[in-house]
Image (cartoon, rainbow, N blue to C red):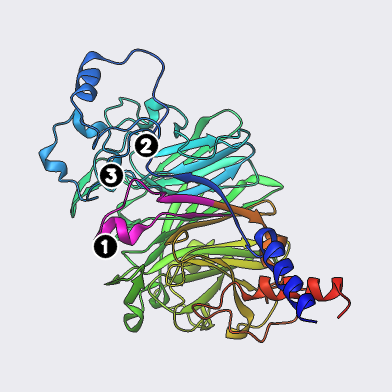
Amino acid sequence: MSALLTLMVLLVFVFCENECKGLNEEYTWTRIDYQWPDDPEPSNVLQGREAMDTRKFFRGSSASPSGNTQIDDNNRNERDLEYIFENNIPMGANKWKDKLFVTVPRRRFGVPSTLNYVWTNTTSKHNVPLIPYPSWDYNRLNSTNRDRIVSVYRTAVDTCDRLWFVDAGVVNSLGSRAPIRPPTVFAIDLNTDTVIRRYELKSSDLAPGSIGLSSLTIDVDPENCNDTFAYIVDLGGYGLIVYDFANDSSWRVTHNYFAMEPSAGDIEVAGIKFQWTDGIFSTALGKRDKDGFRTVFFHSMVGRHMYAVSSRILRNRELATRTYHGDDFKVLGDRGPGAHTTMTAMHEPTGVLFMGLINQNGLGCWNTNKEFLSKNFDIVDRDEVKMIYPSDVKVSGDDVIVLTNNMPLFIYSSLDYNNTNFRVWTGSVQKAIEGTTCSLSRLPTTLACNKKGGCSSPHVTHALENIMKLFRL
């Protein structure tokens, strides 16, 4: 019997090597580099690059300088500020066909391109140079293109093959802000790589604290691409901005539920303790109801609760801009401690809502077909070292995509550029939720998988069940 038990344990480890992880590590970077133009560059740019030392300029993975992440941009001249690799941190990831889009917001100077992509149909997966999208001309700060893009945090791809994003229009540098343009909504036709809509948000759409238009969700009728609304979160100004594509107009929605929850302000990630004040951070859309509207799920990053409102309210300017909303906005419930969440994404066919859990260095899930109870929340995957700060979560078709970027270390400490710092994780939705409470085919697990430290147990339990079946035990 002891030999059989030993064999079972070994089989569990073998099985788990391939099956127990909910996500696969698809792309990795020690630092971010770019695919620079093949055409000869202006002499002043070349001279500026030749003057850079290895701390400011990186090609490929052969050079491996290290050092503190904090770079004083004020001591750089304009030429040298074109590319400072320490100031490039990816924030968002999204997929369309054979392109994986990666955004690098200009949180500091030295970011040559903010909207980029890499090809997914290649075998190269480590330190792949980012390709500016739609072109270098759109991404250069000194470009004369009226549609130039200043700073993008995250993107959205809709069923009409359009890439959406908000250009924050600001370069942040060590606490100072350099406004370059008003925040602007962009829509790009992915089939032609052309900008089809550019809309500058009005001053009435913004608030004094509107410094973080960090994500947007697209509500589109697949039968009528003109019938499109974008829901843009304002995490600093505690508001939601609605953009009406058909009428090329926008309005601001206010509600107390958009604010941060003061009692949840303490955060600990990778041993670093800090306080943030981020309010509403992302929205996710449920299935379309019989009346044609959807449930819009939302949450504050600094908070424990999940909320919801019907798109019927948000899409109607008169209803959305009322000073009092009655019971239109719902409190779904308290997710419990350790529930600080960045982005959420809905897989509409299953109704599974994925959540980037920063306190737990992992990806969580809740099947919205089940009650909003803590026992119905689970962990898809987590890693105390490799999954620090899930900055973005997307669902593309039947796949889930997560970008992790070590953000708290970038801000409060330093990154070791000899090691991998940035990762894009992918996996099929069905495999990711298999063995968790989010799977419709599985009863809720009795293990406390939603608590820190017990997150891989659903997949291990599933592995054990398969081994038991194999031995008919």
Which mark sits nearer the N-terminus, 1 or 2? 2
Q: Residue at x 72, y 65 (%)?
A: 350
Q: Residues within 10 Å of mark 3 (few under 14, many from 20)?
A: many
Query: How packed is label 2: few (under 14 Cα within 10 Å), some, or many (20 or more)?
Result: many
Label 3: element kind: helix
For the residue pair 18 and 214, the one nearer the viewer reads as 18
Mark earlier in primary sequence (2, 3): 3
* Relative image position of residue 132 (x, y in whole percent): 43, 31
Q: Residue furthest right?
A: 472
Q: What's the amino acid at mark 3?
A: Asn
Screen quadrant of the N terminus: bottom right
Q: Give the range drawn in magenta.
A: 401-424
> At x 23% / y 37%, what residue is drawn?
55
Q: How far apart are marks 1 and 2 (CA)?
A: 22 Å
Quadrant location of residue 461?
Answer: bottom right
Q: Which of 105 and 149 is in front in this view?
A: 105
Q: What element carries label 2?
A: loop
Residue 209: assigned label = 1
- Whether residue 51 is in magenta: the answer is no
Q: Which residue is drawn at 36% across and 35% down?
A: 113
164, 318: nearer the viewer: 164
Asked if the stretch drawn in magenta spans residue 417, the answer is yes
In the picture shown, does residue 426 fall above or below 52? below
Q: Mark 2 points at which residue?
A: 149
Residue drawn at 26 percent across, 15 percent down? 42
N-terminal of the pair, mark 1 or mark 3, is 3
Q: Where is residue 96 in the image (x, y as percent from the top left)?
A: 61, 41
Q: Mark 3 points at which residue?
A: 87
> Does the image show residue 217?
yes
Q: Quadrant of residue 54 in the image?
A: top left
